[in-house]
Amino acid sequence: MTKQDALEVFSTCVNHMLSPKGLVDLQAVAMSGGFDHQVHEVHEAVNFASKAAEEARREVLDSTEGDRKQANIAASEAFKNNLPELSHIINVRLFIAVVAAGVKRGYIAAPDARLLLYTAQLQLAAMTKRVQ
């Protein structure tokens, strides 16, 4: 399986998980007002992190006379710093979707994605664990 195939499979899984036919209808949850007011639709969360990354990239390119390596590092850090908080189950699912988009867009390297997704998995498990 190629890297592109793996990304497509992962994206398909995330899209299914977040679709109305999957586990959660994010729009209904966001409209209900019962959860964190920062719950957004997936595209809004991805756009928010991407915008922060591009602003950081431009800042570094402007201040370092075009140092692309430093600009890419700054964009990656900005993207990761603007991931959704892991404060609610819905936000964890958003986090996973935004990480997937970050990998696809080149903001998050595979080793970082693995750690971020493992963190989300642990948080999701902690939130859904039932006390017996």
Image (cartoon, rainbow, N blue to C red):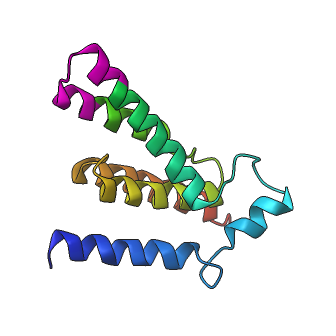
The number of callouts visible is: 0
Q: Is residue 68 above or below residue 39?
A: above
Q: Position of residue 86 (x, y in %)?
A: 57, 48
Q: Position of residue 62 (x, y in %)?
A: 30, 19
Q: Is residue 100 left or right of residue 15?
A: left
**Nearer to the camera, 63 or 125:** 63
Rendered image quadrant of residue 92: bottom right
| 21 is within the stretch colored magenta | no
Q: Residue furthest top?
A: 63
Rendered image quadrant of residue 42: bottom right
Q: Position of residue 72 (x, y in %)?
A: 25, 35
Rendered image quadrant of residue 6: bottom left
Q: Residue at x 52, y 49 (%)?
A: 47
Q: Residue at x 41, y 40 (%)?
A: 80
Q: Position of residue 90 (x, y in %)?
A: 64, 60
Q: Quadrant of the N terminus?
A: bottom left
Which portion, as a residue range, is magenta? 59-73
Q: Quadrant of the C terminus?
A: bottom right
| 60 is within the stretch colored magenta | yes
Overall secondary structure of the magenta stretch?
Answer: helix
Q: Residue at x 63, y 85 (%)?
A: 21
